[in-house]
Amino acid sequence: MVTKRSISILIEWENAIVADQTRAIRMLEHIRQDIEEVGQEYFTLVEIVSGLDPTGINPQLVESMLREAFGTVSWVTIRNVALPGRTYYEMKNECALEARGEIVVLLDSDVIPSPGWLKKMVDSFEDPAVQICASSVHLAVGSLQEKTLALIWIFEIASRAVGLKKTGSIWVNSTAYRREVFLKFPLPGSDGTARASCAAHVRELRAAGIPMHRRMDAHVEHPAPVGASEFVERALARGRDKVLGSPKPFWKNVVYDVKRGLGCIVKRRDEVGVRLIEVPAVLLIASAWWLLMIVGGLAAMIAPKEMRKRLQL
């Protein structure tokens, strides 16, 4: 028999400022459908805790989107938390302090969960050994640039694997925690980087011996960088983060990224729809990414204070 759970879904609205708002609407619709499908008898509490900076996004707009999505589900509690001046990671920490559920689900405002995602994530906590359960995050793919980044960037390639497995890394854009674990290990500050907080968080969890699991069939789609300008910014930021936010030498990080990326291009291109004739173009795009990453890293070595102020993606 499945244990009834109390859950708090924590949504930050910083990403929605720069992303297409239709993604946020689709995300909310998918969550509502999952909640309705399993039914009220599956939960003792379902609440949406929504964190936003009212100077960056209109609180009335967010309230309207949430009411539109969950208006038909009367037993879901919705709470908006005004967090002026807070950053992405700070919003997640603040929302967790407001949460009442025994399980807190961190969810970005620009990712789109697959059908059944929420139940798979919550069911994973039937195993008492599971303290943290991450999703299987993959990039949206359409253009050749998006397919290339799906092969060489930070997220997994979508697969047909199922069930739980232990993992050595997580992304906080769609991860569930036992609440007491998250409150004990909140997200560290980003300190002028874009993704280094996630890596620092993982290092803290590893040092404390907290196991991390990934639900392989709980898929979440992350938006790919759009256009040339965001491609450039993301690549520069990755290089900057590898200098300012990683304990490993920069060049080791670069070599790792290149080797991993080339391996995926050679062995897994079919999984993202790259044809053999397109491989030279993919290699050209990947080479541009790695070159920009090196430029970002070198810039961070030369002017670390200035680079901490820029590329806050």
Image (tube, rainbow, N blue to C red):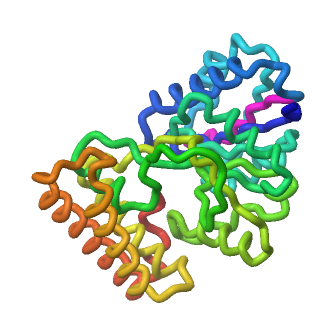
Q: Residue at x 85, y 20 (%)?
A: 41
Q: Please give left or right for residue 200 compared with residue 257 in the image.
A: right
Residue 149 vertical placement versus 100 (above, below): below
Q: Residue at x 89, y 28 (%)?
A: 44
Residue 201 vertical placement versus 29 (above, below): below
Q: Is residue 79 visible?
A: yes
Q: Is residue 91 visible?
A: no
Q: Residue at x 46, y 56 (%)?
A: 155
Q: Residue at x 34, y 75 (%)?
A: 259
Q: Looking at the picture, how far across and down is residue 244, in whole percent? A: 51, 79
Q: Looking at the picture, how far across and down is residue 289, in whole percent? A: 27, 66
Q: What main secondary structure does the magenta stretch of the protein show?
A: strand
Q: Looking at the picture, how far across and down is residue 56, in whole percent? A: 55, 42
Query: Image quadrant for the N terminus?
Result: top right
Q: Which residues are magenta?
A: 45-56
Residue situated in front as seen by the camera: 10 or 31: 31
Q: Please give left or right for residue 282 compared with residue 307 in the image.
A: left
- Residue 49 included in the magenta stretch of the image: yes
Q: Looking at the picture, how far across and down is residue 129, in whole percent? A: 82, 57
- Residue 267 included in the magenta stretch of the image: no
Quarter of the rendering containing residue 59:
top right
Task: Determine the residue located farthest toward the top in the rendered image.
Answer: 72
Residue situated in front as seen by the camera: 70 or 21: 70
